[in-house]
Image (cartoon, coloured by chain):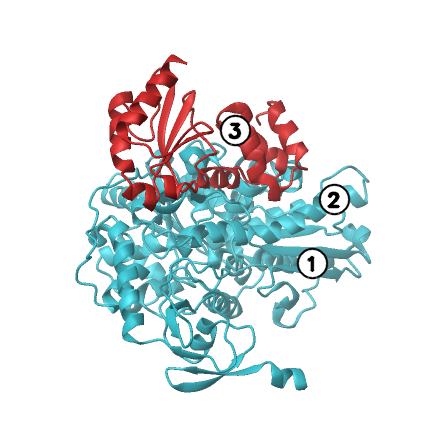
Chain colours: A cyan, B red
Amino acid sequence: MQTAVESKLTVSINGKEFDARKGETILQLAKRNDINIPTLCNHADLCESGNCRMCVVEVEGQRVLQASCTTPVAERMVIRTNTRKVRKTRQMIIELLLAEHVGDCQTCKRNTNCELQDLAAEYGIEEVRFGKSQEKRYEVDTRTPIVRDNDKCILCRRCTQVCEEIQGVEAIKPMGRGKDTDIGCLFGLPLDETTCVFCGQCINRCPTGALTERDATKEVWKAIDDPTKHVVVQTAPAIRAALAEEFDIPPGERVTGKMASALKMIGFDTVFDTDFTADLTIIEEGTELLTRLKKALVEKSQVALPMFTSCSPGWINYIEHYYPDLLPNLSTCKSPQQMFGALIKTYYAQKKGVDPKNIVSVSVMPCTAKKFEADRPEMYDSGYKDVDHVLTTRELARMIKQAGIDLMDLQDSEFDDPMGISTGAAVIFGATGGVMEAAIRTAYELVTGREVPFANLDIRPVRGMEGIREASLTITDPLPEWSFLNGAEVKVAIAHSLTKARMLMDKVRAGEATYHFIEVMACPGGCLGGGGQPIPTSPEIREKRAQAIYTEDGAMKLRKSHENPAVKVLYEEFLKEPNGHKSHELLHTKYTPKDTW
Amino acid sequence: MKMLELDKDVVEISSKYGKSKDHLLRILQDLVAKKGYLTEKIVRDLAKDMNISPNEVYSVATFYSFIKTKPTGKYVIRICQTISCDLAGKEEIIKALEKELRIKCGQTTDDMLFTLETTNCMGMCDQGPAMLVNDEVYTKMDSIKAIELIREYKTK
């Protein structure tokens, strides 16, 4: 008890006393007590760096202003956050940042959602005393899915921090020194000549418009406006749980039906749901896993285990660069987006009687790596480019606004048949652990003939936001054909964010892992925290999106992928059997080792 | 996958320092001393050898003005740009040398003889303006003395 008393400090902010915790910073104490201190480089997901100095405050007895984000509180500290000196200093810091910030707000993707713009407005900046450079100093490379405009960069370093601390990739770094510093790659190379995985986490952390996604809205509008084109859209599970945020609704609101209505109003000819191929992925991937287990346990043949999920294209890029030796462990299943693309221009085209060359296939993804994935040479199995254009959640929101639609005013509507039919198991693909949960729901039932032994089918041990989670399930009394699994303890692991994936992969590489199946998602929180999702992001926001996703799952009539009636029909009419010939042709692929250095 | 062999000097120098990230700066200094400047291959090879990101290597390299990442002339002229030397008239010297060498500060002459650049404080504040030609220090310079000095180097 004594230590608890000792660790409590009394600190005064703006003349009022607060109980502070030993070790916390002035900023943390202020935030807990709803005292607003402006920040730019500070971010809930990242370590404190003290780069931007926006958060300076006066501390009695200190000669100069202190950065509140990196200054720990001390007993009897007297802090002032709104003195003339503090205000003037903050104004000057903003002016200095603006002097170096080249680009018009009106033509910026982050217009009205920019932290620098907000602060300039808040501090009433009417002129920049140091002059404002109008000349662009940097070329903008729009070839890669992540577009960097260093003229708008304020060197806060959130992007390099997230790339290093959360993803462990270090694709971009501060280069040079002092006024010549800029963020980039070695020798000024473009991102695709580094190990960048295009996860887009840097975009989600950028306070300005220096980092954005490569725009696809213009091509999509062009296709919609072309009467000879049949434009089909699919939307990933994580979009419905976050799209409303772009319309100023607090995180956690589901807008599945409204989104379907908006897509129809925008002018897409057919509005489908990636959830359909998420269900299909479970059938294909589940079958693949059981086949691998059978080979290992019954035929005693050499087979790569544990098997890794292959839905997250950022993860695919990562394993290609960093763990090429473990590529055989990767499921051969394409991601739901690419399975969908391959089926639209084959199965759907046949069914609908449309020439696949006139079909434009568009996907809406919470992800920038999906843009990279759609452009991969492996993804032309339909005979055409399987997915023509990938929009992020943010780009879809822009299209909805351009179409003059107020999303929140819309009535709900349904996705089109048949590839709009899905189950709750598919919805949870959008959250970390979701693919695992969906796979277990199906595989367990396939093997035992019984539902998973969890209340309401909620497999809670695989849920949550812990970076790495492990679970195991013992199989008892299986159906005769799976008798070799009787008594087997199936072990699984889940990782989200690539630093966490690296920890698991190092264990696998060292032969210390005893898992059978590992789910990896490149982004923190899974797809719901993807690089194409609304800005800002934080652990709290991702938690709310996850709640929305699990609520959506709970509200679905069908909760297990193998019960999806449209998937059953797809097998009867077209694919014939899971992992069969047709599936291998269209739904599976192989990836290639790439350079780590 | 590029299966090219790692540069021998890179491996030798990084091994000398135990391939430790703590010694990255020392390794880079030795590499520049040996190779003149860092190429993309040297940066990538060193990163691979030390199991760190090539961007990390380049980030550290570009932070220090003496770690070269571009080809330099035989003689690197560095004019101190810090405040004492600035007040003592370093700008005149730069202008004179730019005219003499027909290059801008930061550039290298076509014959690869001279590179002209500025440097931060060398601790010669009481004897400014100060300049370096490779490792030789010259103090209390003015534009005429600087031009004479460079002409001497030309004939060396």
**Residue type at the position of mark 1:** Tyr
The residue shown at (21%, 63%) is A125
Which dot marks residue A239?
A: none
Crowd band around label 2 with a 10 angstrom C-alpha radius: few (<14), some (14–19), many (20+): few
Residue B35 screen position, x and y as percent: 53, 24
Q: Are marks 1 and 3 on the same chain?
A: no
Label 2 sits on what residue type? Ala
Q: Residue A344, position in %: x, y?
A: 43, 42
Residue at numbered disc 2: A510
Kindly give the residue lying farthest to the left in the view shown: A126
**Among the two numbered marks 1 and 2 on one chain, the one whose residue lies closer to the N terminus:** 1
In this rendering, the answer to whether B75 lies above or below A411 is: above
In the picture, the disc for residue A444 is 1
Q: Quadrant of residue A141?
A: top left
Nearer-the-camera pick, A60 or A94: A60
Query: Image check: A407 left or right of A494?
Result: left
Q: Type of residue at label 3?
A: Val
Residue at position x 77%, y 37% in the image: A302
Q: Is residue A418 visible?
A: no
Is residue A432 in sight in this rendering?
A: yes
Q: Give the number of the disc on residue B32.
A: 3
